[in-house]
Image (cartoon, rainbow, N blue to C red):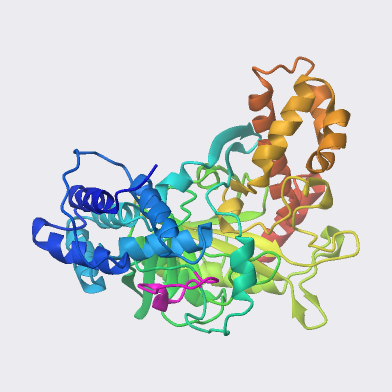
Amino acid sequence: MSVNIHEEITRLIQYGLQKNLLTKWDIDVVRNKLLEVLELDECIMVEVKEENLEHPAAILDNMLDWAAKNNRIAENSITYRDLFDTKIMGCFASMPSEVNRTFYDHYQQSPQKATSYYYKLSKDIHYIRRDRIAKNERWVTNTDFGELEITINLSKPEKDPKAIAASKSLKESNYPLCLLCKENAGYAGRINHPARQNHRIIPVELQEELWYMQFSPYVYYNEHAIVFASEHTPMHISKQTFKRLLAFVEQFPHYFLGSNADLPIVGGSILTHDHFQGGYHEFPMAKARINKLFSLEAHPDVKAGIVHWPMSVVRLQSSHHASLVEAADFILKKWKSYSDQSAGILAFTDQTPHNTVTPIARKRGDLYELDLVLRNNRTNSKHPDGIYHPHAEVHHIKKENIGLIEVMGLAVLPGRLKDEMSLVAKGLVQNNLSEVASRHDQVKKHVKWAEKIKKKYPHIEAENVQSILQQELGLVFATILEHAGVFKQTAEGQLAFSRFMNSLNEE
């Protein structure tokens, strides 16, 4: 089907008007910007029928097909298409000063209105690609620790082999220094760095320091925000971290905010730029009850307890901001030097530290709350990837680090599982797992697990196989979180956890 590019330009302008990305006074300028990007010398005015589109993906796909056919992009591949459609949507992007002013005008009414405006803008301008996020598979699984949230991540595009090859011949660039740096806003991108012409960031003051807020383009949950330092400085958990987290939830009380740990294996994918993740979502861990209360003699106005959760979580609550910071810093310092040989916990190997925390802050009415998830990144010969990391027996499902989002009870499982589970389902329903595995190498790693499922559920049929596999994937995720827990869910493990908590009151 041939594309009338002038029709698509008019459709996109109509979409922009409907989403308040421009007004009638901006039409000529935006149209001329689009003509420039598309390398067209003139405009042919056409009429189009009125549409109410949720997102511009269908229009952009037509434009990209036209661009590929008319040599406006080097390759008709996902990398080059993404670079070009971001450039197109950049024509609708307001100046940062205007976005900031509108955000803080809304903030005067309520913090919730401000983030809601900014989230809508990020989606409407196609920085958050709703068409891709809709592909993610989501469900909840009931476990002993409450409902866990599971997603199979299908929104991140596969790496483009041609673009990978082309990027090897590119001159090395250190601009922007990383994917989080503020210089990404408005950047045209290149083969090995995403375009961000439609990206705007919001300045936020934390502890008299300039930080910025943006949304994750992959939004794993509602209003999935990233708050990052204005300078490219490495991740570091300290007393200042707790101050910043609480300062943020004071300004945005409907959000939680947390930090990945600052050590390899137990940290996130970016350790080189200090940042937090937050959003307008109540995670399973936030709903978990306190199993056992402890008093902190040095901090009597702070309530402390162990959370009923597969990982090892200390929850602190107080109406006093400063008291909570002091208590959290006290526990962090204790934990960083804490060893318990009988529980397999060593704080150091020679001079290399192993203990840190994944902290999460939230506000509950008048109370401030900090969850400190105890982490240790030690390895040994049995677990070379990490003792408190997904163990080998679950690597067929997930072997990546357990970061902040998963710590809180939302599994982000690899996209490969969609096709692999479809084949496992076929083998279970037809009762020929071995045969399916012999024809499909990617199923072999799942056979042992699938055989156990077959024994557990005697009547597996086409109608129930999907829900059975979803339930079992959720239970594997609960096991993964238990692997990452430093104090195990056994009588001995919980006794060891109590020993650590009691040590907080010892001189």
The image position of residue 435, as x and y in percent, is 87, 29
The image position of residue 35, as x and y in percent, is 25, 65
Q: Which quadrant: the N terminus? A: top left
Q: Which residues are magenta?
A: 179-193
Q: Nearer the viewer, residue 151 or 26?
A: 26
Q: 418 left or right of 63?
A: right
Q: Nearer the viewer, residue 2 or 378?
A: 2
Q: Nearer the viewer, residue 7 or 411?
A: 7
Residue at point 72%, 28% (across, down): 425
- Decide: is 487 above or below 266: above
Q: Nearer the viewer, residue 11 or 220?
A: 11
The image position of residue 3, as x and y in percent, is 34, 48
Q: 27 left or right of 362?
A: left
The image position of residue 162, as x and y in percent, is 61, 64
Magenta stretch: includes residue 283: no
Q: Is residue 257 visible?
A: no
User: Majority secondary structure of the magenta segment?
Assistant: loop
Q: Quadrant of residue 295?
A: bottom right
Q: Residue furthest left?
A: 25
Q: Which quadrant: the C terminus? A: bottom right
Q: Quadrant of residue 138?
A: top right
Residue at point 53%, 84% (across, down): 174
Q: Quadrant of residue 200?
A: bottom left
- Decide: is 347 above or below 89: below
